[in-house]
Amino acid sequence: MFIAQLSDTHVDTAQPHKAEALRRAVAFLTTLPRTPDAVLITGDCTEHGLPEEYETFQAALSPLTMPVYVVPGNHDDRAQMLARFPLPGEGLSGFLQYAVEDRPLRLIGLDTHWPGQGAGQLCAARLAWLDEVLAQAPERPTLLFMHHPPIQSGLQVMDAIGLRGRAELCEVVQRHPQVVRVLAGHVHMPLTAGFAHTTVMTCPGTDATFQPDWAQPHKLVIQYQPPLALLHHWQEGAGLVSFTAAPERAPWVTLHDGQRWAG
Ligand SMILES: [Fe+2]
């Protein structure tokens, strides 16, 4: 199974370059040598949660023929998203939180949206739902995806709007060894960190990446650049292997064709 992840597209009708960055990322996904089986978008789909922003967001995704699974970020509007993105599987009433069952890798989207707050939240109802749904299929390798990562980045601006309920989520995940990875967005940079028995990875934003400056952790530095995506390949035995992809680089050159190395 091959999964592409985009994040923090922040579509804003007043800033058309953000939708353009999303369109470029989508075009990149349609030209990959192997078509992804699914695309995950880990929140902050729009800047203000407005209907016209979601219309632009959905139009930008229209070239994608595979299922696209979304979760809300702090910039999103949960009601708008629930109205536009029907839950693809069993979900928690009132939240954009659901399990996708018909894939080799079970996908569970978590809703960390906390209305009016930049920080994220996993309340007791969302955590209990996750615990129960994970307990229903302990033998099935499972990927969690969410907007707010359950880690601290060491960057003060982002950690101030981090996830509330991290320790509680860690306890739930610890009980379920079939969780192979936790994917998130929010921090606009590719971070990797340990979490419970597994690993958290965050996806850069399609439009811009924050550069961690741990020497000055009160600062937040941004770099506008071509869109970035994460590509995740799942194979029984090999597990989940992830790659940070930049669509607009030099052309790909075949180094080994499966038989021999290129000269
Ligand atoms: Fe964001």
Image (tube, rainbow, N blue to C red):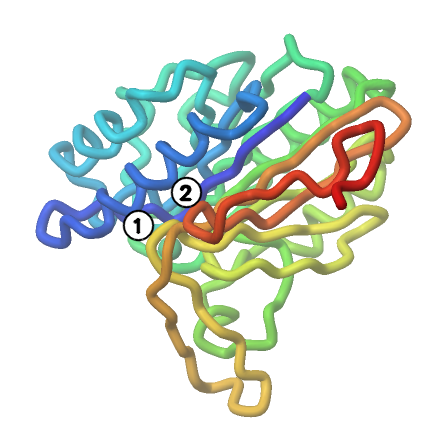
Mark 1 packing: few (<14 Cα in 10 Å), some, or many (20+)?
many
Q: Label 1's element?
A: loop
Query: Which of the labelled discs sits on residue 43, or is there none?
Result: 2
Residue with the most extreme right position: 237
Q: Residues within 10 Å of mark 2 (few under 14, many from 20)?
A: many
Horizontal side of residue 8 vs 33, given as left or right = left
The amino acid at mark 2 is Gly
Task: Find residue 70 and report its horizontal and vertical position in percent.
Answer: 43, 30
For the point 44% across and 23% down, which residue is it? 68
Q: Position of residue 190 (x, y in %)?
A: 57, 58
Q: Quadrant of residue 117?
A: bottom left
Q: How many marks?
A: 2
Quadrant showing the N terminus: top right
| Mark 1 vs 2, N-terminal side | 2
SS for tag 2? Answer: loop
Residue 220's place in the image compared with 112, above or below, is below
Q: Residue at x 46, y 53 (%)?
A: 249
**Pick the front one: 20 or 247:** 247
Identity, as a three-letter code, of the amino acid under mark 1: His
- Between 37 and 100, the one lying in front of the other is 37
Residue 161, placed above or below residue 45 = below
Residue 256: image location, x then y, percent:
76, 38
Q: Is mark 2 within 8 Å of ligand 1?
A: yes
Q: Residue furthest top?
A: 102
57 shown above or below 76: above
Q: Which residue is mark 1?
A: 75
